[in-house]
Image: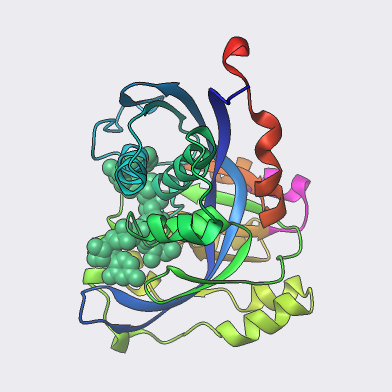
Amino acid sequence: MPVERLVLAARAKINLALDVLFKRPDGYHEVAMVMQSLALADKVTLTADRALSVVSTAPDLECGPSNLAYRAAALLRERCGVDRGVRIALEKNIPLAAGLAGGSADAAAVLRGLNRLWGLGLTLSELEGVGAALGSDVPFCLRGGTVLATGRGEALRSLPALPHAWIVLAKPPVAVSTAWVYGNYRGERVTLRPDVAGMESCLAAGDLNGVTARLANVLETVTVPAHPAVAALKAAMLEHGARASLMSGSGPTVFGIADNLRQAEKIAAALRSSTDAWVTVTETAGELEGEDGTTVAADQA
Ligand SMILES: C[C@](O)(CO)[C@H](O)COP(=O)(O)OP(=O)(O)OC[C@H]1O[C@@H](n2ccc(N)nc2=O)[C@H](O)[C@@H]1O
Ligand SMILES: Nc1ncnc2c1ncn2[C@@H]1O[C@H](COP(=O)(O)OP(=O)(O)OP(=O)(O)O)[C@@H](O)[C@H]1O
């Protein structure tokens, strides 16, 4: 029976390391990043339809042709000469404009799902190529796990999985534009560059302490002065017992690494008096592949 409906997890990411090497002639910045998937996820439901449409649980999110999930479906349809549509329902659990790649994760889930729903037979590497045309974080969101991303973020090499870690996320009530952060980046203001090679060695050795000791993100030099709440949250994470804390991506979300679930819940509870906070856990790429069990046929929908 052909698949008529698919339910996919669109997982959030954090950047364990983010270095900016130089500004390229095409306007993008050359980066070196260690990226990590989280269990925190939007739920993306794809239902076969004649037209292309998006609905979402987030009242502030534009669901028309500018939505990244819509753009992903439209681009794949055009590239593969498909004459069908799809109804995309987004249950948004990842906060918007947070530095957690929520939109990119939705786009990646749509590409992965439509590859099956429309029977396209594209490889992961072909899907990553389509994803790169939508945004620099989309190829990573397709692959998942623990990954070294270079180029503008689209050139990927999978790394040994980060040892399972409990993560606390806290987002100050401000939205940060990624383009603004890169546009205001000045390399000369950076005092601490991430040791990406050292972090890779720690991952190969399964050394979580070594990874946490090397967390660094040069984009903090742009976002923190504009939003002091980010620095305050980083300090609060440590004060309440996190092993380490860092801003994710272009921010403003801060993540902390906790020793266990109990401690993570305790840190999140303490932070919730002043801001939104979530507890989640790291995910491996294998856990992403295992989602086929959520497929439902049309008559069960
Ligand atoms: C901050 C990160 O989220 C870290 O993972 C990514 O580097 C950003 O990825 P993204 O949101 O998918 O970014 P894109 O949608 O490709 O680009 C948004 C804007 O950010 C800037 N940008 C992005 C990526 C990059 N390597 N250099 C840049 O200068 C560009 O001005 C671009 O117009
Ligand atoms: N499906 C989507 N989900 C969330 N945001 C979307 C989506 N489609 C388009 N957007 C737009 O993209 C902007 C950035 O949202 P997103 O949640 O992806 O940010 P982010 O977490 O900072 O991403 P990144 O870490 O990749 O820079 C939002 O302000 C929103 O207008």
Q: Residue at x 31, y 46 (%)?
A: 75
Q: How is the image coloured?
A: rainbow
Q: Residue at x 72, y 80 (%)?
A: 202
Number of numbered discs:
0
Left or right: residue 25 compared with residue 283: left
Q: Residue at x 35, y 37 (%)?
A: 82
**Viewer-closest of 67 and 279:** 67
Ligand 1: quadrant of the figure: bottom left
Does 134 lie within the magenta span? no
Residue 189 showing in the rendered view: yes
Q: Quadrant of residue 272?
A: top right
Left or right: residue 33 compared with residue 211: left
Q: Quadrant of residue 8?
A: top right
Does 260 lie within the magenta span? yes
**Picture layout, residue 102 above or below residue 44:** below
Quadrant where the N terminus sits is: top right
**Viewer-closest of 170 and 14:** 14
**Picture layout, residue 13 above or below residue 193:** above
Q: Which residues are magenta?
A: 258-267
Q: Position of residue 293 (x, y in %)?
A: 71, 32
Left or right: residue 189 compared with residue 301: left
Q: Residue at x 54, y 43 (%)?
A: 277
Q: What is the magenta segment's predominant secondary structure? A: helix
Residue 226 showing in the rendered view: no
Q: Position of residue 39 (x, y in %)?
A: 63, 45
**Viewer-closest of 88 and 185:** 88
Q: Position of residue 146 (x, y in %)?
A: 63, 65
**Picture layout, residue 179 above or below residue 46:** below
Q: Quadrant of residue 189?
A: bottom left
Q: Position of residue 136 (x, y in %)?
A: 37, 62
**Picture layout, residue 195 above or below residue 94:** below
**Viewer-closest of 245 and 110:** 110
